[in-house]
Amino acid sequence: MNDMIDLMKAHTSVRNFTEEKIPAETLRELIDAGRAASNWKNFQSYSIIVVDDQEQKDKIFEIQAQKSIKNCSAFLVFVGDLNRAEKAVKLNAGDFNPAGIESLLISSVDAAVAGENVLLAAESLGFGGVMVGLIRDQSAELSDVLNLPDFTYPIFGIALGKPARLNPVKPRLPYENVVFSNTYQEQDEASIKAYDKVQEEYAGARRLGSSWSQRIVEQWGKSENPSSTQNLKAKKLL
Ligand SMILES: Cc1cc2nc3c(=O)[nH]c(=O)nc-3n(C[C@H](O)[C@H](O)[C@H](O)COP(=O)(O)O)c2cc1C
């Protein structure tokens, strides 16, 4: 349709990088492109920690052992941030009541929208990356390494760099299973089974050992990891 849409539809996560570094000024441009995203009431309730120091990347890798964190050019940690809001409230002598789900939705959505923009900007220049949400499994430990104050919490990272190789584009659910006309339409099991098959065919030789729907059981068949909730309470956000 156009280059922008082609780029978006060619997205594929990159977890293996060459040694090539993203130049500092380029990285700054990518992040500024991300920061141009829409955000709630222009409050920009997130911060981005650029981790480009190898020792610091290694420390995060020790906490959450994903190779992309260690081997990327830069690991950007997107942090939900109501710490600035506290300062603004104090400036105006107001009461500060940030704790609750709505604040978390505001800051998490803001960060996610900006993060996706950064990733797309990187892809437009031939770089690539992967979002890393599993850092939330060790939220408190990561918060310590990054020196995160009250009213902040890690949401996800993005490992960025020059792709060592690109996976084929991963097929999404069929349009009709996700996009409904005017009202919600609950799906039947047949659509789940059909997508299990699509994913199995996509994975091909790189067998993942479980089907798409079985991986959903691994996620939601048990109680959630308490790490985020505990950390959010410690940071006075819950
Ligand atoms: C919020 C978020 C967190 C993610 N966390 C991880 C992660 O911790 N590790 C990982 O390898 N991939 C992670 N991913 C990447 C997804 O697994 C990937 O986007 C998805 O399987 C679709 O594949 P694609 O991006 O190649 O199209 C994450 C993606 C998002 C949006």
Image (tube, rainbow, N blue to C red):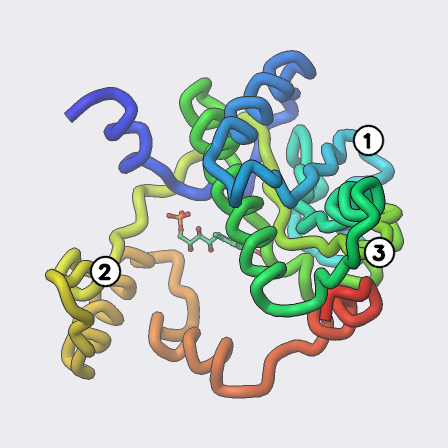
Which of the marked residues, 2 or 3, is nearer the chain's N terminus?
A: 3
Contact check, label 1 and label 3, Cβ < 8 Å: no
Q: Nearer the viewer, residue 158 or 171?
A: 158
Which residue is the site of mark 1?
Answer: 53
Q: Quadrant of residue 142?
A: bottom right
Left or right placement of residue 181 versus residue 75 in this view? left
Q: Measuring 68% from the left and 62% from the top, which residue is drawn there?
A: 136
Amino acid type at circle 3 is Asp
Which of the marked residues, 1 or 3, is nearer the chain's N terminus?
A: 1
- Image quadrant occupied by the N terminus: top left
Q: Nearer the viewer, residue 86 or 137?
A: 86
- Residue, far bottom: 222
Q: Which mark is residue 150?
A: 3
Vertical side of 109 occupied by 127: above or below: above
Q: Nearer the viewer, residue 204 or 170?
A: 170
Amino acid type at circle 1 is Asp
Left or right placement of residue 170 versus residue 42 in this view? left
**Residue 6 position within the rendered picture, expressed as x and y whole percent measured from the top left:** 25, 28
Amino acid type at circle 2 is Leu
- Residue, far front: 93
Q: Which mark is residue 173?
A: 2
Distance between the alpha carbons at the discs numbered 1 and 2: 38 Å
Distance between the alpha carbons at the discs numbered 2 and 3: 39 Å
Vertical side of 30 occupied by 171: above or below: below
